Structures are given as structure tokens and as C-alpha cells.
Image (tube, helix red, strand yellow):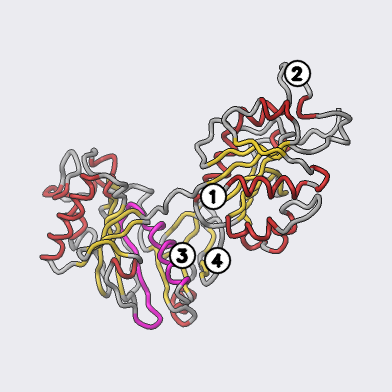
Amino acid sequence: MELWNFRGKQNTITEALQIRLPEHAVVSVVGAGGKTSLIFAWARELAASGKKVVITTTTHMYRPDRMEEDGIRIVVSDDPERPDKVSAPHAEVLDSLRDTADVVLIEADGSRRMPLKWPADHEPVIPDYTDVTVCVAGLSALGRRTADVVYNAAGLPDVLKRETVDMNFMHAIVSSRDGGQKGVRGDFRVFMNQIDDDIDRLAAAYRMQQIFAVMGIQSAWGTLMPEEPKIAVILEAAGNSTRFGSNKLLHIMDDGRPMIAYIFDAVRPLDVYKKVLVTQYDDIAEMAAGFDVVMNDRPDLGISRSMQLGLTAAGDADAYMFCVCDQPGLNTSTIERLIEAYKKGTAGIVSLAWQGKMCNPKIFSSRYREELMKLSGDTGGRQIIASHKDDLLLVEAESENEVKDIDRL
């Protein structure tokens, strides 16, 4: 996450927006281009400082992967018409949240993931007791067709209508009393998101900040998405295949390839920090072009030995994906979905699943490295997961064939 304001680079969202939050503060977030990202990043920042935080909505928001994190509660209602979304809790519940939290963060607007918004007549829905209103605007809209990047572009007043989005247009709709400042309660702030290392967007944000300042509006800008975590994929190929009767990973499948080739082909296209193979077999090591190969000289010590050799080879990775090599049906696209689920930052352990049952592969955050290094024997990561169930996210496989492992001929 990168944050700036007129004073330069900032460490926190609270600092960047120059906000002094009162006791039991209520913050309503409107606009488009990263409202949910801002809310969740801010909530984690506040929770890390010891605050009790509640996230909610007065309209709709996409359903979070998890409904509770350390120091953070998410209070919403199910949306029967949109299972991928949640809606506002009952009014009396919403009103009572201030008494149970240090900070309440409210998603008070909808934008269908477009970078800019012009509110409709019934929008936004900002509670009267809001202390701070923050309008988010996505700089990715610059230079693009207005109709493609502005939610409710048809509702723009004639004076603002134009074919493409430029800096003046973005500034005008964000600062308008009928646009970004519509229904504002409490202090008003602007966050310009999606800089994304683009020098033109950075220049536009800096210029708009100057114009906002003349109007008495404080603003900040940056990129809310965190830096890409460094993920190491570790292939465990050191087993003795006792139930199979021979080295099953070299067994020739129906298409003429050895079983091990399937996981190699699934992992090679991945854009990850490191790809590690742990094996006891020279024949398999010779096939592992593009992988850091670690020879396991003590396979008798069980799977924990392979995991720990892989962890050591992974170096300073932020997370580790452990893959068994006897799931020939596993697809690259499914592995990528696991990685994307981990990158959302909502869970420290992500596992493939079938019909709600945990399967392989699994990703562990580096914060579990010490526990993984203490495993012994044929104990994998399941006992760690059992102790941290609240930090587990399951991702369903595309088919049962993907999670089947082959133990016998």
C-alpha cells in the first residue's frame, strides 16, 4: 500500500487523510474506485493499533471471505437476491454499532466496481451521525470513455457531460455538491486511488490535490492494494510410494507421460517468487527444469522433512504453497485461484477443497513458518490448521478429478 498527501509519503490511511477520529467514530465511505479496499485496509490498520472496528454498509457490498478478523467485526445482512453480496443490517442494529466499537466504517455507496461515480437520486446513504465522509475516486478512469468508467454517467448534468475523462472532469464530479459531496456529514476527505506507478496519474493527483486545497478540501492519493506477496510453490516428491508398489511419480499415464509431469506442467506457467522441488529421486530431479531442486536424504523422517527442506529453500518468501505430486487432474487455473484468494489478505491459510472438505494444495503465510519447522514425522500442516481454524479459507476445486490423488494401481 502506497500513500501520499501534500506533506509527502505517509505510513497510514489516518495520517494520509489528516483525520483525528473522535471516540466511537463513524466514517462513511462513498464514491467509486476502491471503497471496499479502503475500508478493509483502514480497518486492519486501526485494529493493529488496538482499536475495535466494525465494518458495515447502508447499501450493498460484496460478501467478504470472512466475517470476522482480529479486532474487526463485519455486521451486515444477507441479500437473498444476490448471494455474492450483503446488505445493510436493520436500522436499529446500525444505530447501535457506535456503542460497541471504537470506529465504525460504513460503505455508504455502490458503484459496480467502476472507478468513478455520479450518484443517483437515492444515493449515497450516509447516516446523520457520521463524523467523517471520505469520497474515493479511481485514477484508472483518466483518458477513458466516460460511459465506460463512470457509474450512472447517464445522470450527469449537461454541463459535465463529455466523451472522455480528464483531470478537470474528475475534480468536478468529486467536488460537486451533487456528486462526491452529496449528502456529506461531518468532515469531508477525498482519496484518489489507483496511482499504480503511473506517472501521469501521479501528476494528475498532485494537481487535483492543489485545487482541492484551494477549496478547503483535504485529500490524499496512492494505491490501496498491498505489494504482491512473494509466494513459493513447494512440490513434495520424496515419498516411498509403499502403497503403490513402485515409484508412482514415474508411472506412465494414459497419454504416455509420467505422473510427475502433470504437476510440473501445472506449476511451470505460474508467476511466483520461487518454485521448489523436494525429492529423493535423481530421475525426477533431472526433469525439474525451472525448479530449485532439494534432495531429501532422509525420506524416512516423513513428510515433515520434505516440508522443512522446502521452507529452507524458499528463503524469505511471504507464503508457501505445498503441493503433492500425485494429483494429475490439478489445473494451473485452480492453483492461480488459490494464489489470488491468498493475495486478498483475508486469511493466512488457504486450502483447495471439494464440497467443503479440505484437500491439497495448501498455502501457509510465513507467520506459520516456525510452527511448520517444528513438525515431525508424517505430520503435515493439518495440525497447524486445527489450531488456527479462524484463519483458514477454503477454495472449491472445479471438479472432483482435480483433488483425487493416486495411491494404487
Residue 83 appears in the figure = no
Q: Secondary structure at mark 3?
A: loop
Task: Give the labeled residue for mark 4.
Answer: 69
Q: For residue 122, which quarter of the picture?
A: bottom left
Give the residue type that dot 1 points to.
Ala
Q: Nearer the viewer, mark 4 or mark 3?
A: 4
Residue 6 appears in the figure = yes
**Residue at horizontal 15 percent and vertical 54 percent from the top:** 207
- Judging depth in this view, the residue of 144 and 158 nearest the camera is 144
**Residue at horizontal 71 percent and vertical 49 percent from the top:** 358
Residue 148 position (above or below residue 375): above
Q: Nearer the viewer, mark 2 or mark 3?
A: 2
**Residue at horizontal 13 percent and vertical 50 percent from the top:** 168
- Marking on residue 254: 2
- Marking on residue 88: 3
Q: Nearer the viewer, mark 1 or mark 2?
A: 1
